[in-house]
Image (spheres, rainbow, N blue to C red):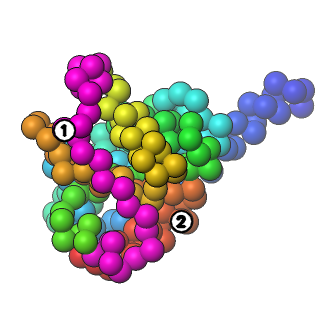
Amino acid sequence: MDKNELKNHLETEEKLILINQIREIYDFIKIKKFSKLIPEVRTNISGALQNAKEKEDIAGIDGRITIVNGVPKAAGDIKFSAAEHTARLLLTAKKYDNSINFVINLKYSPELIDNIKSKTYLQLQEIKREEQPEDIKKKEFSTMQWLIKECVDKTGTVPDIIWDKGTIGKEPMIRLFAKTSAELIDKLKKIIQLI
C-alpha cells in the first residue's frame, strides 16, 4: 500500500467510525421521552473528523430528526455535508477547542435550563440574540460563528451548553457540545432525566 492509498484508507476508516458514533447517539435518543426535546426546527446531531476544517468534514443526519408516532425518527441517512447549522457550530467550536467533536440542538424551556443549572455539573452560557450586530444578522451563515465567539469572549471557553431565548423569527434553542460520542450520550442522559 503506497502513502496515498494508506491515507485514503485511514480517512475512510475515520469516517466510518464517526458515522457509527453518530448512529450510537441517534439510537440512544430514539425514545418517546426525547421527543419533548425536539424543537420546531427539528434536531440534528453533528460529528466532526478530528481535524475538520470544512462542512465536508462534518457528518450529520440528512433532513434532521423529526417525530413520527411520538418517537424521534431520522428523515434520512447519516452523511457527510448533510448538516448546516450544527456543522457551522462545530467547525467554529473546533477553532477554539479542537477536542470538541459533537453537537446536538435541543428544544429550549426555562424550566429545563433551571434544572440543568441546579441539578447537573454542565456548564451553561446564555447568548442574547438581540445583541447580535446588524452586519452579522444580515450576513448569511454567520450567526453560528457569532454565538461561539460570544461565549469564548465571555468565558474563555466553549461551554457544554450554549442557549438563547430566541428573537423575532428565530426559535429559542439549546446547543449541547461534547468531545466524544460517549460524553454526549452521558450529558443527554442527565438532561433526559430532568424532563
Q: In this view, does 156 lie to the left or right of 87?
A: right
x and y percentages locating residue 172 in the rendered image:
19, 50
Quickly name the residue at label 1.
Answer: 130
Q: Which of marks 1 and 2 is in front?
A: 1
123 within the magenta span: yes
Query: Of residues 182 and 138, which is closer to you in this image?
Result: 138
> As drawn, which residue projects farthest toward the front?
154
Q: Which amino acid does label 1 sit on?
A: Glu
In-front residue for pair 4/114: 114
Residue visible at 19% across and 38% down in the picture? 130
Percent of width and height locating residue 6: 82, 33
Task: Write the residue at 40% across / 76% down.
Answer: 120
The spot of residue 29 in percent (x, y) is 36, 65
User: At 78% from the left edge and 31% from the top edge, which residue is drawn?
Assistant: 7
What residue range appears in magenta?
115-139
* Identity, as a three-letter code, of the amino acid under mark 2: Glu
Q: Does the magenta stretch include residue 129?
A: yes
Relative placement, left or right, of 131 versus 76 is: left
- Residue located farthest toward the left when viewing the structure as drawn: 168
- Which quarter of the picture shows residue 70? bottom left
Using the image, determine if residue 35 lies above or below residue 167. Answer: below
State yes or no: discs 1 and 2 in contact (Cβ < 8 Å).
Answer: no
Residue identified by numbered label 2: 183
Q: In which quarter of the image is residue 187?
A: bottom left
